[in-house]
Image (cartoon, helix red, strand yellow):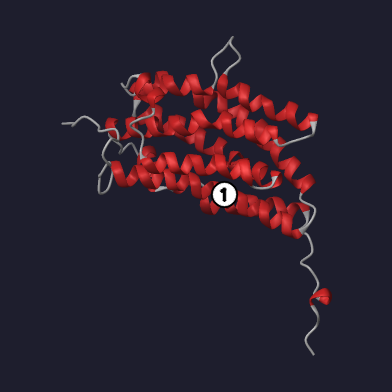
Amino acid sequence: MTPSVNHVAENPPLSEAAFIAGFHAIGEERYHHKHPFHLLMHEGKLTRGQLQAWALNRYYYQSRIPIKDAAILARSDDPAFRVAWRKRILDHDGDGAKPGGIEKWLRLVEATDLSRDIALRGDSILPATRFAVQAYVDFVSTRPHLEAVASSLTELFSKKLITLRMDRLREHYPWLSGGLDYFTGRLTQATEDSEFALAWVVSHAHTREQQDLAHAALRAKCDILWAQLDALYFAYVNPGWPPPGAFQPAKES
């Protein structure tokens, strides 16, 4: 005899250790440290034009991070959460006394030998970059608050990638060394931010369904980051077809 729906046991919640391990497993499988574009970067195989395209398109993502964080902050009725989360906005926008992450990324754009104006205008980024970044802003604005916060947990994996990136950029592209301040700051900021976000998600995901949705949110964020690199690879590496209106690197000898 088939049991009724009411008698079907729900999946029990994962232990805290298993829940956290699930996030790390997702990062190992899906974080963009394994993307072919990043692998080429770390092997010193990108041209100046390809690095310019990366810095330019990534700036658009950086410029929307405070908007994303403001959307998450505005959805919380917990003053303690808002106090902790607004730090992220200051880290990227700056506080008027010292430059934030956005200004530091503009300096990286300039280190590639592009003007900051081309980044600020935003009219030469790839359409796929614009769509992917907007998808992230829409995600944190419309999905439940728990999922919005969980989507930020790619920061759990960023310190290792940033450390490798700084080392390899200095080794293979020494002309970029003057524009790496953004990454230096993120070594500590990302660690602090991810520790708070992870603790908050763990304490607010009470059911297995909520835990599964939190894991799914992190997978969605990884997909968004991967999609941005897919677009860069297609446009500037292979086959190398930047769409009309997108940044066109100078021909290199």
Q: Secondary structure at mark 1?
A: helix
Q: Is residue 73 above or below residue 181?
A: below
* Quadrant in the picture for the N terminus: bottom right
Question: Which residue is found at the position 51% from the left and 38% from the top?
Answer: 161
Q: Which residue is mark 1?
A: 27
- Binning the other alpha carbons within 10 Å of mark 1 as few (below 14), some (14 to 19) or many (20 upward) gives many
Measuring from the top left, give residue 141's x and y in whole percent. Answer: 62, 41
Measuring from the top left, give residue 185's x and y in whole percent. Answer: 56, 23
28 displayed left or right of 49: right
Measuring from the top left, give residue 72's x and y in whole percent. Answer: 66, 36
* Quadrant in the picture for the C terminus: top left
Q: Is residue 61 above or below residue 238?
A: above
In which quadrant of the rendered view does residue 97 lie? top right
Question: Which residue is found at the position 75% from the left and 59% from the top?
Answer: 208
Name the amino acid, label 1.
Gly
Question: Which residue is found at the position 51% from the left and 27% from the top?
Answer: 183
Question: Which residue is found at the position 56% from the left and 35% from the top?
Answer: 159
Residue 119 in view in this figure: yes
